[in-house]
Image (tube, grey):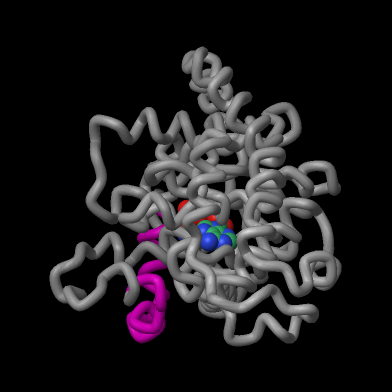
Amino acid sequence: MRRILSGMQPTNRLQLGNYLGALRNWVALQDQNYQCLYCVVDMHAITQPYDAATLAQSTREAAAAYIAAGVDPKKCILFVQSAVADLHAELMWYLATMTQIGKLNRMTQFKDKAGKDSERVGLGLYAYPVLMAADILLYKATHVPVGHDQKQHLELAREIAATFNHRYGQDFFPQPEPQILGEATRVMSLRDGTQKMSKSDPSDLSRINLTDDADMIADKIKRAKTDPHPLPDTVEGLAGRPEADNLLTIYAALSGRAKADVVAEFAGQQFSQFKPKLAEVCVAALSPITARMRELLQDPAEIDAILRDGGSQAREIGAPVMADVRKIMGLWS
Ligand code: TYM
């Protein structure tokens, strides 16, 4: 059985990178002969400072964004991580006993998020990749569609699965395969083409949120950082021009075209000619999602019902896996 598990943190609002790097691929994959589990990972979101008063609503909004982008709760299991918190946390603990801290020390996202203050950040942030491995292995997922930034976490999940299998002499967990798909696996900040576009960047001008309206999108693109040269006539000409590369990549991904094709179309043009065109494709792609999201959020009870149902379906898959894990590991229960 081919099974997909993927998730997003309900931190602030979802942004274009989440959409192009992950969400859009989730939607395509639900029709390709996988059982798909898509999760809102609220237990990951609390590893950094957050607002308890708004977390549940952000979780609902993330679920609404999944559905608005095309994730179909009739085809997929759509759930919240904390609805199955006992199993995710339990498996995380077991996996933590077989995760070397040397490997956690090498996680670049931890280093980025902890910054200079790594002695004072919480254990949860450090152990975050182990919880992510538990999310995937709890459901014996075989495939994990994510953006490029999650590659290292997935490699760790594969190593942990192999360690478990080796230590207990069983071929129990499958090796989860990363699916890093499409033209835009790494969408960069609009303010700095060398930094990833991120929900947590303090500047809202750095990203396009799935909830931005047409005027905001056009304004952010207009103000996006560029360089003084006209657009190049080959993809190779984008080398050393991270902002130009990023904007053309976004255009290609949103219009469903190859980057080389888009570069050829805009060759020699100024950013001032290209940017309005980019704003147009952005608005065309995102405005139906934003509108549908708004509609869905009018009825939070309906979203909660979908999530509750998804939670029990996820539990049905995860509970027997956990029962086997306890037995294999020799726990008394
Ligand atoms: P998160 O919430 O940071 O991002 C969710 C998804 O969006 C992708 N993404 C991007 N892709 C391209 N360009 C960008 N600028 C960009 N920003 C984000 C991410 O790669 C991701 O696929 N640790 C994960 C959440 C997680 C998870 C899991 C994922 C927890 N458990 C189990 C898969 C399987 C995270 O923080 O994603």
Whether residue 131 is visible to the viewer of this picture, yes or no, is yes
* Residue 177 falls inside the magenta stretch: no
Q: Position of residue 213 (x, y in %)?
A: 53, 34
Q: How many marks?
A: 0
Task: Look at 43% across and 57% down and name the residue there.
Answer: 206
Q: Position of residue 218 (x, y in %)?
A: 56, 45
Is 24 on the left-hand or right-hand side of 259? left
Examine the image and state in which quarter residue 53 appears. Answer: top left
Whether residue 89 is visible to the viewer of this picture, yes or no, is no
Query: Looking at the image, which is closer to me, 329 or 88?
Result: 88
Q: Position of residue 187 (x, y in %)?
A: 57, 63
- The answer to whether residue 74 is above or below residue 27 is above
Is 32 on the left-hand or right-hand side of 239? right
Q: Extreme left residue here?
A: 120
Query: Looking at the image, which is closer to me, 131 or 213?
Result: 213
User: What secondary structure do most residues of the magenta stretch adopt?
Assistant: helix
Examine the image and state in which quarter residue 110 appears. Answer: bottom left
* Residue 109 falls inside the magenta stretch: yes
Task: Look at 75% across and 33% down and name the residue there.
Answer: 75
Task: Look at 51% across and 35% down and name the residue there.
Answer: 211
- The answer to whether residue 312 is above or below residue 99 is above
- The answer to whether residue 269 is above or below residue 289 is below
Is 34 on the left-hand or right-hand side of 56? right
Task: Look at 65% across and 40% down and name the residue there.
Answer: 283
Q: What span is colored magenta in the figure?
A: 89-110
Q: Position of residue 318 (x, y in %)?
A: 56, 45
Query: Looking at the image, which is closer to me, 152 or 22?
Result: 22
